Image (spheres, grey):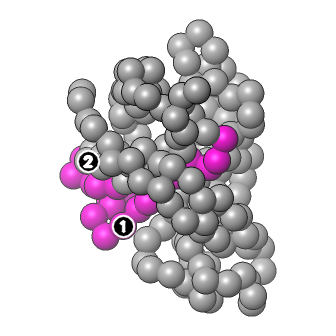
């Protein structure tokens, strides 16, 4: 696999949605989306139609083969971008995604196929002039996203900064 990302500087984003704490050993993210999707249309002040699937990892989280631990907990969010957080629906929260540099990978395939992430963290990132930054990671799920479909398309946003 060889996918070259676009590198873009993104402005701060405000997301309204729901979150859960999980890990890769017990990745029950479907239950988060099952709670969020029926309430998604009640979010006011929405920007665009895309859905955001965000991950907020702890500072000590490692994606490297020697340091990866599937038992390490992190937050997963299902949400949408908004202009303002006033009048948020009950049971929803907001998350500010700070501005910064992102490597954006366009991915086509099953959302259960982890090979794209193995490529990003195992090949592309170590060979690039970038390192991971501590901002949220996210997938932007637009019109071409189809859960469980091998022809589904999404954009994967990896927070990066130049190596020192």
Quarter of the rendering containing residue 73: top right
Q: Whole-percent x and y of residue 114?
A: 41, 32
Question: Is label 2 in a helix, a strand or a loop?
Answer: strand
Q: Is residue 91 left or right of residue 108?
A: right
Dot 2 corresponds to which residue? 108
Whether residue 150 appears in magenta in the rendering, the answer is yes
Dot 1 corresponds to which residue? 142
Which residue is at 64% across, 47% downward? 135
Residue 154's place in the image compared with 43, above or below, is above
Residue 116's place in the image compared with 7, above or below, is above
Q: Whole-percent x and y of residue 134?
A: 66, 41
Which residue is at 44% across, 60% downward? 140
| Residue, far front | 164
Span highlighted in magenta in the image: 134-154
Which residue is at 65% across, 58% downward? 98
Residue 44's place in the image compared with 139, above or below, is below
Q: Whole-percent x and y of residue 81?
A: 56, 73
């Amino acid at each position: 696999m060889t996918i070259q990302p676009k590198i873009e500087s993104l402005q701060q984003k405000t997301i309204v949605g729901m979150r859960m704490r999980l890990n890769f050993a017990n990745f029950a993210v479907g239950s988060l989306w099952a709670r969020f999707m029926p309430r998604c249309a009640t979010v006011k002040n929405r920007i665009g139609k895309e859905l955001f699937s965000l991950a907020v990892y702890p500072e000590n989280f490692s994606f490297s083969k020697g340091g990866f631990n599937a038992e390490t907990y992190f937050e997963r969010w299902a949400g949408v971008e908004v202009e303002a957080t006033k009048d948020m629906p009950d049971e929803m929260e907001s998350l500010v995604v700070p501005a910064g540099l992102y490597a954006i990978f366009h991915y086509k395939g099953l959302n259960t196929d982890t090979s794209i992430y193995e490529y990003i963290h195992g090949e592309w990132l170590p060979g690039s002039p970038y390192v991971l930054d501590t901002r949220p990671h996210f997938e932007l799920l637009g019109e071409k996203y189809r859960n469980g479909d091998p022809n589904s398309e999404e954009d994967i946003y990896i927070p990066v900064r130049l190596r020192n």
